[in-house]
Each structure stands twice: as C-alpha cells, then as structure tokens.
Amino acid sequence: MKNILSVLCFSLLSGAAFGQTSVLKNTTAIEAVTPLNTPTEIAIIPEPVAIVKNQGHFILPENVTIQCPAMPETKQLLAFLQERISVPTGRYVSVVNNKSATISLSLNEKANHTIGAEGYQLTVTPHHITIKANQPAGLFYGIQSLLQLFPAAIESKEAVDGITWKAPCVEVTDYPRLGWRGLMFDVARHFFTKEEVKQYINAMVRYKYNLLHLHLTDDEGWRIEIKGLPKLTEIGAWSVKKVGEFGNFIPPTADEPRNYGGFYTQEDIKELVQYAKDRFVNIMPEIDVPGHSLATISSYPELSCTPGAENYHVRSGERIMDWSRGAPPTALVDNTLCPANEKVYSFLDTVITQVAALFPFEYIHMGGDEAPFNFWEKNEAIKALMQKEGLKDMHQVQGYFEKRVQKIVASKGKKFIGWDEILDGGLSPSAAVMSWRGMKYGIEAAKKGHEVVMSPSTYAYLDYMQADAITEPRVYASLRLSKAYEFEPVPADVDPKYIKGGQANLWTEQVYNIRQAEYMTWPRGMAIAESVWSPKEKKNWPNFFNRVEQHFKRLDVAETKYAPSVYDPIFKVSRSADKQLLIDLSTEVAGLDIYYSFDNSFPDSFYPKYTEKLTPPKDATMLKVITYRGKTPVGRMMNMPIEELNKRAGRK
C-alpha cells in the first residue's frame, strides 16, 4: 500500500480525564491526568472503561491457587495464566475448585449486558483477586490487565529474584469499544517462520488485539501450500536474497540462487490458527489479487494476460512499478491476473476452497489494491471482454473481476473483504471494505451500506518511518506515535453500525526480521489498540504516553524490541530574510531538553541547550543532537548533516 503523507504535525491533546469514575467511600479515584514522566502504579494499556483505586496492595503468596470453570475454552487460558505467574515469580501455581483460591476466574450465570462478550470485571483486594466475565474471552482480557498491575518483571521468561510481587487494590470494569481490533502482518514481502508469527501473536494479545490479518501472497512470495498447485510454493515462495533499500535493488542475474523465502504447509496453518484461537485471536487470510500477483504468475504464467510472462520471476526487490504519475501505477512488468482468462477463476476457486477450509474466520481478504491497468489496456482479450460485458473502463474491468471473485468466496460460505479500490468497480453492499487510502473511502463505503474496517495509512501504517529519515529505514512517509494516537476509527458523519472496527498494518518491504517487525509495531501498536478498545472520551495523550513509558520497561523485560523514536528531536528548517539556514528543533513529548553541537563532538547535558532557532556556523558540516530528561539522556544521538538540512530548506 502506498499513500504519500504530507509533513506530519503534532499538537498535544487536551482530552477528557482518564480513569475517572464516581468515587466510592474509602477509595481514591485515579488522577485525571498524571503529570508526564511521573511513574504511575496503574498503567494499563489500553485504558479501561472505569478504574477505581482502593487502599492497599495484594501480595502474591508463595503458593498461588487459581479457581477457574472447567471447560474447553478455558483450558489454554488457565495454562497461560499459570505460566505467566509461575515462570517469573518462581511461585507454585495450582488449580483448585474452591472459593478460597488466590485468584478466582468466573463466568457470570446471568449475562452482564454492559460488558458484552469480551468485557470483564477485575477486583483486586489485599487478600484476593477476582475476574468475572460473560465469556472466556473476557476472562482472558481481564488476565492481561491483571498482569499489567504487577511489576514489570512479571514479563520475564525466567525467574527473577528480589521482587515484591504486589498489585494495587483496584476495581476495574472494562469492555472494548469495537469488535474488530486488528493487526496486519505482511509475511509475503519477507517470510516469517511459524514460530515468529506465534511470537507476534503473543505480543499483540497483551494489548487486547483479537484479529491477525496475514498478508500471504504478493509479488515477493506465495506463502501458503495449495494442494494440486505445487508450483506456487516450489517457485512462487522463493526469491534472491537482497538487503538494502527495497525497490531499488539491481535485478537479479540468472545465476543468483533463488533460495530466500519459505511458506507455510497446511499443517502449519492449522497449528497457527489453533495457537491464535487459544489466545482469542482470529486469523484472517489475504490472497491479494488481481494485482500484486507476480509470484503467482511466475509459478503459472498462463494466468497472465501478457505474452512473455513465462520469463517472469518472483520479485526480489527490484523496481517493477512506476509511481511517478500516482495511482494506479504504471507496471514495468505485468503483475496482474487476467480478468479475461477463465483459467484464473478456476485457479482462484481451487485456492479459495482450500483457504476457506483452513481458516475458520468468517472473512477472506482478496486484496484488490494497486492493480495497474497499462497492460490490460492493450490486451485484445480484455478488449473483447469489455465489449461482451459492456464495460466502459479499466475500473469496471477490475469490478467485473472482483464480482466474480466475490461469488467464489461466497460459494465457500465466507464473506468477501478487500482494500478500498474494490469500490471503484461498483461491488454489491455485501462486500466489506478495508479503507487504507485515508478515512474518506471508508466513509464513502459506509454511506453506501458496506461494512468497513478502518485502517488508514494516515494513522495506522506501521511500516512508515517513526522519526527523522536519518534514523529510520527510508520509506515514503512518516507516522509518529502521537499521530497514530489521534486515530479515530468511527467518523462522526457515518452510521457507526457499519464500522466493524480498526486495524494497523505492518507492510514488510523494509522489514527483514522479527526484531525489526517488533520495532516497527511497538509502541505505535499500543496507540492503535487504545483507539479501538478504549472509550473515545478517555483518550488523552499525556496520560497515554506516561503509561507507554512504563510499558517500555515491560517490553525490555519481555525482550520485545520497540522504537524509542518518540524521544528523538523533530527538525524543521527555513530561511531567514538574508537566506541563512534556520533550524527549529522540537520534541514530540513535553519535558525534554535538547543539547547540541556543531563541532563534531558528541553533546551531553553540559553542552549548549537548545532554546531558539539555530543558524549553523559557516563551515559546520554536522549538527549532533540528543534529548535529556533532567540529567538523564533519553533520546538517541542524532547526526544530522548540514547538507541534508540545506536540501530540505531549499537552496536560495
């Protein structure tokens, strides 16, 4: 997905108070807005609907007992809680069937309609912990909040000594704002192993995500075994290994080995689906057609409209599209399936039949984005199709294709969803739309009666740079944490019944390994999680970031990589009346000081502190900056070439 953003702006939000409820007798309400950078004992993400902090603490005993209803849906939930407590604490954790248990998990005999299917009520007293819910999913989310009340060391994968394992006494009532709370993980551009996908699932459930969208096919790889179509994984799953700046690689030579990639067997998929289900996550597969199909065409060239497709290869990161004229792009090689070829629909019927059987989730995502038209426009079969079907332009040609694909999906008992370009061909209202090109296409789709998942690049594209381009893998746009936190998935001018939920998307062109996938996801994934779970009126940037800082400590212990980009200075440049370069520095979070140098040495808190716009000395070549909070460095040392700043300001 591509959508070039304008330069991002940031302004602190001054929203309603967090964590305010009616104050009960002998209790104290959580502070409405905790001063930024002041550690808070309660730092749950996403922010619950209501929290009341009571006096005292619960101290975890040496022998922990858990009471839980015995049913298939709670078996893995119980095993999850036992492991999460016993491993870091070294405590003995057992399951009992009596009311005196240390931790009681119970399902309501009479449904509490306020909290719904995924909500919970968590009560921590000095001697006991209780989680109540209507459904096992609610118990699981209650467990996530409970674990966030304990010290950060609870995230350890091994026993930790010297910790007082305590949690503040609280009463929490919580339930999600939206039912679809998704993360998209692109495993096509770069392959991620089954164990790495599990690792990603384990990270996302901490923040109450319930949908993993797996982007399984693209120009760079076909990642799922389809029986009867062996070339998809024999050929389509492998490319030449390249590293550097994706999209600008030198085309591979014939003698370079195509051994980089991989795929999931159908048994792998079944294992992942069950692993996710045990953590109350659905997996939605995506088979991206008709564009983004070079791996498919490299495997079965007869599915292309274009002569010579038998010479195509799975993309290894070389340039295959010209975006200079905007969308749709001009294809340099034809990466589309042919809408005028009946073999394509037979092929898709085989694929969708097996995909539908492997994934229980009700939707199958069929892509539909960024299909180039320039090869279709000169194809005689396409021209004949247009005459036969009365199609006026290429958007209608794609619309014809999408309608046929939708029928195939429906014939397997599944619902069809695609990227918002599918709207251009006039689909029936039964098709669901995932809006990525900003919010407007989702709004348009909802007004036409389509169900919509909001995943706008403006707020929710996790492949975008998080800080200045000199520190990040260069991508075509930026998305800072504060901007991601502004995501509002339910527009004011649409009927909310059509908004199924929201989702963040991690495209992996520039993401080569799971550590970088984590780095790109967190903490921005926390911002999106809060946007789709927490009440709109409770969102508050200073409060949120204060909690994020507490979660940085948790991610450190969990050995999950994250981006500290939010601490990096923001550079803005201009020219004075006499054409001198002016450098304006700011920070995304309040309370940070910026220190700098022009003499190539590394600044610390004894160096000049930034207070007003800077003009570099005449012969300076480098500006080095670092942020501090008080006497403690918090940002990364940034080396900004003066030449780069001059380019940004424009030479005069």
Image: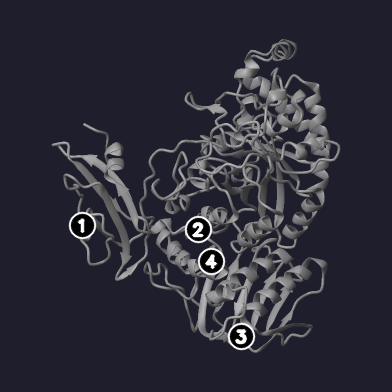
> Going from the N terminus, do you reach mark 1 or mark 4 first?
4
Callout 1 crowding tier (Cα within 10 Å): few <14, some 14–19, many ≥20? few
> Which amino acid type is shown beneath numbered disc 4?
Leu
Q: In which quarter of the image is residue 150?
A: bottom right
Give SS at disc 3: loop
Query: Dot 1 corresponds to which residue?
Result: 611
Give SS at disc 4: helix
> Going from the N terminus, do you reach mark 1 or mark 2 first?
2
Query: Dot 2 corresponds to which residue?
Result: 523
Mark 1 to mark 2 CA distance (whole Å): 29 Å
Give SS at disc 2: loop
Callout 2 crowding tier (Cα within 10 Å): few <14, some 14–19, many ≥20? many
Mark 4 to mark 2 CA distance (whole Å): 10 Å
The answer to whether the residue labelled 4 contacts the one labelled 3, judged by CB atoms less than 8 Å apart, is: no
Query: Dot 4 corresponds to which residue?
Result: 555
Q: Which residue reaches farthest bottom?
A: 62
The answer to whether the residue labelled 1 contacts the one labelled 2, judged by CB atoms less than 8 Å apart, is: no
Callout 4 crowding tier (Cα within 10 Å): few <14, some 14–19, many ≥20? many
